[in-house]
Image (cartoon, rainbow, N blue to C red):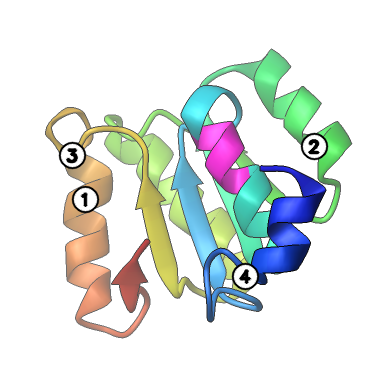
Amino acid sequence: MTEQQTSSAGPVLGGIAGQRVLVTAGASGIGRAIADLLIAQGARVHICDVSDDFLADFRKAHPKAGTSKADVSDEADVERLFTDLERELGGLDALEPITPASLAPPVMSKLCRRQNGGVVSRCV
């Protein structure tokens, strides 16, 4: 998206500013592009990924965003990810699951349980 498209069309994701969003697989590729857009639109973003190098690059570009090294198909990693999220953001308002749900049952299961408790209110 160009600067002109952003400024002439206004916010791309209305209502996302200030929202707490988790982007899985968010340090590179499509996940990174989505995280970059969310941050540009004013969202409070936390990403997880398995690549130390890509996470380091993301942290350098977005020092205020949260990051966790986590494989969302691993239950222990998902527990640590949610501990990080609670500490850094105080919960979630939205989820952008780049990782297919079929490959990440622990994170999706945890999100479903927590959604009922008011941790996640929507998927973007």
Mark 3 secondary-structure assignment: helix
Asked whether disc 2 touches disc 3, contact meaning CB atoms under 8 Å apart, the reply is no
Residue 69, percent from left and from top: 57, 31
Q: Which residue is mark 3?
A: 101
Residue at 42 percent of width and 67 percent of height: 94
Which corner quadrant of the image does residue 39 belong to? Answer: bottom right
Q: CA distance from mark 2 to mark 3?
A: 26 Å
Q: Which residue is mark 2?
A: 59
57 versus 32 height, above or below: above
Q: Main secondary structure of the magenta part?
A: helix
- In this picture, which residue range is highlighted in magenta? 31-35
Q: Earlier in the sequence, mark 3 or mark 1?
A: 3
Asked whether disc 4 touches disc 1, contact meaning CB atoms under 8 Å apart, the reply is no
Please name the amino acid that badge 4 sits on: Leu
Please name the amino acid that badge 2 sits on: Arg
Residue at 73 percent of width and 66 percent of height: 8
